[in-house]
């Protein structure tokens, strides 16, 4: 008995030793190290912009500003330092998870000295890298380790994905794609699971992942729609094979779970853009006539009552017909249906991209002309996003020699993502996932064809494509630069120090988030184009229009000039208002040349006069007026010679550029403020850096907050009524009253005024003189 037990013990020990040896071999296997290595590559590329001093673009400045505010005041909903004079209700913007993710990273890392800004910069690479890993394990499950390796590498190296998942560029669609990648990962596990209970569990987890996306981005609805294409693809494949369509049905039903979860989370984190209390939701509700009821979201109601049942009905019909239609007819019908579906979907996006109201309600407000990312991409955009990695997509048809279940899954997942960029440039980010998904499978199939002596050639070809594409992406990522610079930071910090906390700023809408972040002031427009701002710059508004918005300061800048076409389009001006920016060309002795295409300007200073000559496509003339800005300030030049009647020139020697314009443009408030010292008397210059950014104060009966004393001071006091509104941090109005302030120069806020946030309107009879909003008890450090 003892020897028997000994032998059993020895066998057990030998078995354990074999298991340990096998585990070590698995650990040393390249396929087990590959995910970690790819994740490291993806993360390191995406943190390259971490070194930059400023965030990239515009929107990240608002997100960072609110995140910093949250660390001081908690998760308040009413944010008074944006969208003046009303303030900003966060639950009408994005769900709080958009800021909750970097806040969590900050909480976890602050013990190691991680700052709020540092956490903000780290969060996008974290989620971008997790998306790459999710793709790896999805493709490994549905196809092979080789395809998984290539797919993950393609996504890790594609600039189209890097750009919106890198440090210093914080965008919500990064979260949407991450959660969708988890949905596909759970689907891939469920698809090949034989046990029905476990299969249903995986699909339920996919629905949960889809629902969780609702806490992070207001346009998360795409994560509910895309799985339906996968469900239809899988159902079509099983119909073709005459098999059970249970998987397609469960995939579709999982989006119902996602919709319910999204509705529940909306009560905690905030709803998306189609919330019934948002104008987008009201518009969609009006278009469809479908009430969401307790779901509180117009799209969620539409999804559960129309879109999901229609998809389930299609799958159910396929299920019923699969046993009644001959195999040949099923093949023809399936191919024809898929072809028609793709053509119709593509045609709708291409032809009705700007008017597809149900899909783009709330997004179409941005317009194509005003924002580059919401216009259709050109070849340059596609080349920048994908470069040679796009060639992997051409290899995917190799997998269709013998279509398999994985192809139905891959095409259902990837084709919608690849078609979406036909709609907007920003969707090149989503398209990168589709490219990587199909490209990895195509690359693996290509390597299968290169056997024996041809294998080194195949590996070399794939490696070269990855290296060239990776080099392009690393270079493009390294060369990304913020739009904001020290000029804007200095100007807006000066504004913060010289203005009142409750003052309102009129600036080009792109710059509104910069005003919130650097100056801690509320801008009239930010995040979306503003017709009022554009028409003000063109001189088509009145001072009364500005007073109704409480405007106290106005900015003009070189960056606004660079957007002159968008400015005109936003103001509804297709023609006229000519403005041509000419950068410095070269200098010949005392003569300085500025060039832009067929336009050239030559400027030379004599002792007391200037020689100026414009060459416009061969026509030469002297401008009617020439304004110079140099270290001595702005002044009109004494130019000799016969002048042209409708041409005006501004030359900036501080920063080396010139601006040629017609009389219509020269007479606009923008031109008078930016290019001359002959601007309306209602404005006084408070800051200039000599040609990049200028800030003017609008002279009017102003209300200034003196926080320490709880007093509102009236400057140029001519009003007789002050309306005071009190709000909680949640945005609920708890106080409203009008006070008679005739002959008063200041007003002490009485104890009866309730609310954490105060809004006010200063009037003379029924004429609005000023408006504003501020946090009552404490400001923003």
Image (cartoon, grey):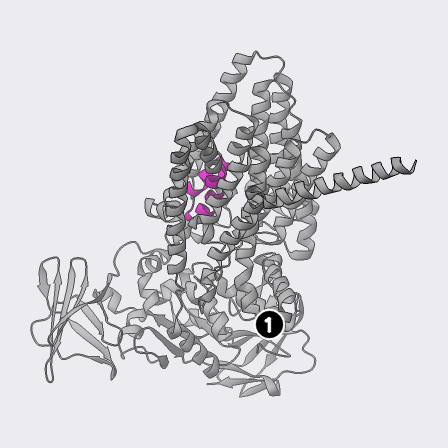
Above or below for 490 versus 376: below
Query: Where in the figure is residue 293, as x and y percent of width and height?
Result: 68, 45
Residue 369 position (above or below residue 5): below
Q: Which residue is mark 1?
A: 113
- Residue 394 falls within the magenta-colored stretch: no
Membership of 432 in magenta stretch: yes
Residue 249 placement, left or right of 145: right
Residue drawn at x 59%, y 62% as measured from the top left: 102
Identify the residue at horizontal 9%, vertical 60% (top origin): 619
The segment highlighted magenta reads 414-437
Residue at image x 69%, y 82%?
751
The answer to whether residue 712 is seen in the rendering is yes
**Which quadrant of the structure image shows residue 669?**
bottom left
Left or right placement of residue 128 versus residue 727 in this view: left
What residue lies at 31% left-to-right and 61% top-to-bottom?
564
Identify the secondary structure beneath mark 1: loop
Residue in front for this viewpoint, 582 or 586: 586
Residue 290 seen in render: no
């Amino acid at each position: 008995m003892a020897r028997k037990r000994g032998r059993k013990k020895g066998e057990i020990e030998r078995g354990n030793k074999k298991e340990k040896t096998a585990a070590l071999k698995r650990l040393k296997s390249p396929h087990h190290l590959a995910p970690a290595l790819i994740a490291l590559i993806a993360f390191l590329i995406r943190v390259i912009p971490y070194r930059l001093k400023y965030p990239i673009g515009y929107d990240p400045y608002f997100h960072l500003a609110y995140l910093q505010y949250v660390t001081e005041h908690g998760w308040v909903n009413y944010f008074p330092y944006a969208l003046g004079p009303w303030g900003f209700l966060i639950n009408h913007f994005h769900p709080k998870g958009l800021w909750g993710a970097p806040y969590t990273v900050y909480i976890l890392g602050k013990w190691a000295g991680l700052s709020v800004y540092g956490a903000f910069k780290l969060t996008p690479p974290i989620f971008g890298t997790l998306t790459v890993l999710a793709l790896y394990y999805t493709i490994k499950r549905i196809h092979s380790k080789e395809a998984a390796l290539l797919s993950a590498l393609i996504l890790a190296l594609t600039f189209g994905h890097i750009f919106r998942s890198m440090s210093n560029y914080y965008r919500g669609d990064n979260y949407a794609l991450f959660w969708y990648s988890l949905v596909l990962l759970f689907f891939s596990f469920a698809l090949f699971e034989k046990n029905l209970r476990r299969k249903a569990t995986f699909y339920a987890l996919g629905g949960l992942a889809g629902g969780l996306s609702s806490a992070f981005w207001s346009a998360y609805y795409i994560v509910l729609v895309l799985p339906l294409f996968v469900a239809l693809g899988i159902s079509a494949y099983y119909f073709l094979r005459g098999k059970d369509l249970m998987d397609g049905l469960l995939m579709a039903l999982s989006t119902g779970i996602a919709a319910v979860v999204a509705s529940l989370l909306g009560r905690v984190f905030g709803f998306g853009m189609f919330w019934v209390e948002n104008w987008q939701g009201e518009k969609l509700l009006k278009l469809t006539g479908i009430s969401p009821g307790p779901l509180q979201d117009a799209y969620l109601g539409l999804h559960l009552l129309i879109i999901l049942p229609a998809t389930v009905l299609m799958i159910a019909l396929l299920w019923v017909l699969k046993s009644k239609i001959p195999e040949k007819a099923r093949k023809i019908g399936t191919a024809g249906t898929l072809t028609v579906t793709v053509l119709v979907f593509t045609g709708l996006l291409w032809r009705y991209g700007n008017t597809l109201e149900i899909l783009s309600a709330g997004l179409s407000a941005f317009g194509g002309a005003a924002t580059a990312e919401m216009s259709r991409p050109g070849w340059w955009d596609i080349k920048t996003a994908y470069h040679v990695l796009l060639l992997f997509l051409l290899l995917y048809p190799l997998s269709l020699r013998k279509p398999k279940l994985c192809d139905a899954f891959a095409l259902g997942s990837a084709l919608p993502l690849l078609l979406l960029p036909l709609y907007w440039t920003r969707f090149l980010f989503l398209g990168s996932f589709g490219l990587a998904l199909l490209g990895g499978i195509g690359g693996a199939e290509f390597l299968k064809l290169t056997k024996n002596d041809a294998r080194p050639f195949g590996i070399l070809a794939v490696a070269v494509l990855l290296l060239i594409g990776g080099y392009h992406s690393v270079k493009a990522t390294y060369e990304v630069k913020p739009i904001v610079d020290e000029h804007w930071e200095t100007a807006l910090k000066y504004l913060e120090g010289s203005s009142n906390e409750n003052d309102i700023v009129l600036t080009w809408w792109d710059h509104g988030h910069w005003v919130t972040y650097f100056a801690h002031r509320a801008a009239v427009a930010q995040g979306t184009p503003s017709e009022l701002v554009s028409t003000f710059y063109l001189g088509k508004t009145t001072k009364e229009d500005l007073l109704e918005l409480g405007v106290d300061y106005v900015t003009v800048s070189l960056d606004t000039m660079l957007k002159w076409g968008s400015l005109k389009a936003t103001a509804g001006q297709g023609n006229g208002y000519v403005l041509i920016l000419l950068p410095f060309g070269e200098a010949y002795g005392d003569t300085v040349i500025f060039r832009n295409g067929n336009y050239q300007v030559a400027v030379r200073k004599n002792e007391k006069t200037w020689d100026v000559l414009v060459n416009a496509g061969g026509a030469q003339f002297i401008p009617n007026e020439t304004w110079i800005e140099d270290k001595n300030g702005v002044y009109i030049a004494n130019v000799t010679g016969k002048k042209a009647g409708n041409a005006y020139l501004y030359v900036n020697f501080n920063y080396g550029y010139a601006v040629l314009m017609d009389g219509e443009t020269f007479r606009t408030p923008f031109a008078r403020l930016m290019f001359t010292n002959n601007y309306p008397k209602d404005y006084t210059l408070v800051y200039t850096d000599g040609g990049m950014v200028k800030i003017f104060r609008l002279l009017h009966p102003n209300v200034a907050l003196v926080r320490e004393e709880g007093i509102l001071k009236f400057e140029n006091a001519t009003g007789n009524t002050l309306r005071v509104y009190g709000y909680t941090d949640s945005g609920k109005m708890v106080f409203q009253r009008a006070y008679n302030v005739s002959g008063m120069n200041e007003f002490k806020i009485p104890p009866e005024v309730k609310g954490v946030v105060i809004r006010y309107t200063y009037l003379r009879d029924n004429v609005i003189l000023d408006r504003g909003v501020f946090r009552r008890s404490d400001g923003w450090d």
